[in-house]
């Protein structure tokens, strides 16, 4: 939407100059008496115009900050679910949550939350660039706490490097061809299990911001599809951990907006 300049003309001579001196003097007198009210009105109009500009700029590309907020609210994020689920995961996995790897977009946020927990070591893998990330995230990248890695290829970690591997918003953007390589590799670097957070089909829609960032829309798969797929690649679901997670979630009144799968590591 194009913006048109607002022209507030306060010069009476340009509008009323042909109406005679008495009318001009009367207007000047009324103007002097109403100037405080007029000032307040102009401030209110200016504030409304500023809000309208910010809103339209966020939708049309003119306001980067507003656009970022809107996309996060409208878009779907299982990474946000991981952050919410950390207390539940700690109850379910106990001491196994002491050395954690998170894989997925915005991993810096998850890693920062995990590092704030007592006796917890955390690392992250960001599958996409971090050019627009904040200073704290870039600091984690410089320290190699977070690595920017193309997860379609083997991760730069030795087998069984982490007790637990958490993954969110990453597998949904992989084709079946690369999923066949990535998921077993995630299990390879874990000791006590792999927890996958993935979106529900038909409940979430791909946003333009997602396609722009990830290069493609998410392919959201059903629970039955995932269960069948895990069996095909010889990944066994961890029923004991799933029961503990469900029990802890009930006690903490936690309800996930994503599918959560608990898988065993390779022996």
Image (cartoon, grey):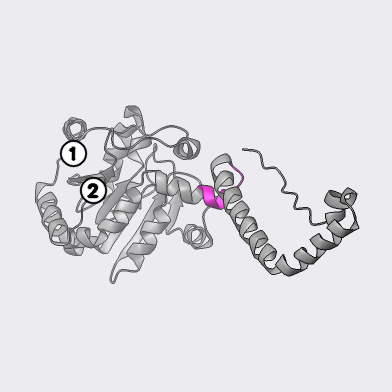
| Image vertical order of residue 20 relative to residue 172, above or below | below
Residue that carries the numbered disc 2 in the rendered image: 194
The quarter in which the N terminus is drawn is top right
- Residue 187 sits in quarter: top left
Q: Viewed as shown, does residue 175 lie left or right of 135?
A: left
Residue 235 screen position, x and y as percent: 18, 39
Q: First in sequence: mark 2 or mark 1? A: 2
Front residue (pair 188, 109):
109
Q: Is the C-beta separation of discs 2 and 1 under 8 Å?
A: yes
| Image vertical order of residue 199 relative to residue 216, above or below | below
Residue 179 is covered by the magenta coloring:
no
Q: Which mark is residue 235?
A: 1
Q: CA distance from mark 2 to mark 1?
A: 10 Å
Residue 20 screen position, x and y as percent: 90, 53
Q: Which residues are magenta?
A: 61-67
| Image vertical order of residue 97 relative to residue 207, above or below | below
Residue at the (43%, 44%) spot, across then down: 127
């Amino acid at each position: 939407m194009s913006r048109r300049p607002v022209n507030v003309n306060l010069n009476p001579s340009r509008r009323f100059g042909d109406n005679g001196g008495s009318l001009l003097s009367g207007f000047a007198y009324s103007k002097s008496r109403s100037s405080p009210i007029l000032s307040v009105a102009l401030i209110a109009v200016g504030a409304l115009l500023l809000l309208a500009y910010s809103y339209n700029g966020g939708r049309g590309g003119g306001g980067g900050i507003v656009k970022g907020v809107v996309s996060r609210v409208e878009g779907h994020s299982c990474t946000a679910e991981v952050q919410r689920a950390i207390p539940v995961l700690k109850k379910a996995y106990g001491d196994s949550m002491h050395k954690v790897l998170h894989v997925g977009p915005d991993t810096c946020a998850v890693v920062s939350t995990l590092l704030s927990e007592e006796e917890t070591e955390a690392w992250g893998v960001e599958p996409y660039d971090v050019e627009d990330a904040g200073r704290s995230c870039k600091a984690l990248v410089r320290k190699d706490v977070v690595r920017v890695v193309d997860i379609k290829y083997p991760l730069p970690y030795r087998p069984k490097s982490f007790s637990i591997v958490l993954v969110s918003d990453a597998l949904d953007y992989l084709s079946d061809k690369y999923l066949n390589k990535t998921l077993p590799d995630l299990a390879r670097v874990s000791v006590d299990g792999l927890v996958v957070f993935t979106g529900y089909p038909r409940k979430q829609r791909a946003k333009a911001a997602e396609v722009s960032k990830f290069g493609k829309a998410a392919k959201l798969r059903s629970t039955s599809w995932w269960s069948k797929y895990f069996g095909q690649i010889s990944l066994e679901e961890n029923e004991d951990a799933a029961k503990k997670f469900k029990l802890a979630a009930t006690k903490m009144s936690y309800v996930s907006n994503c599918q959560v799968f608990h898988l065993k590591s390779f022996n």
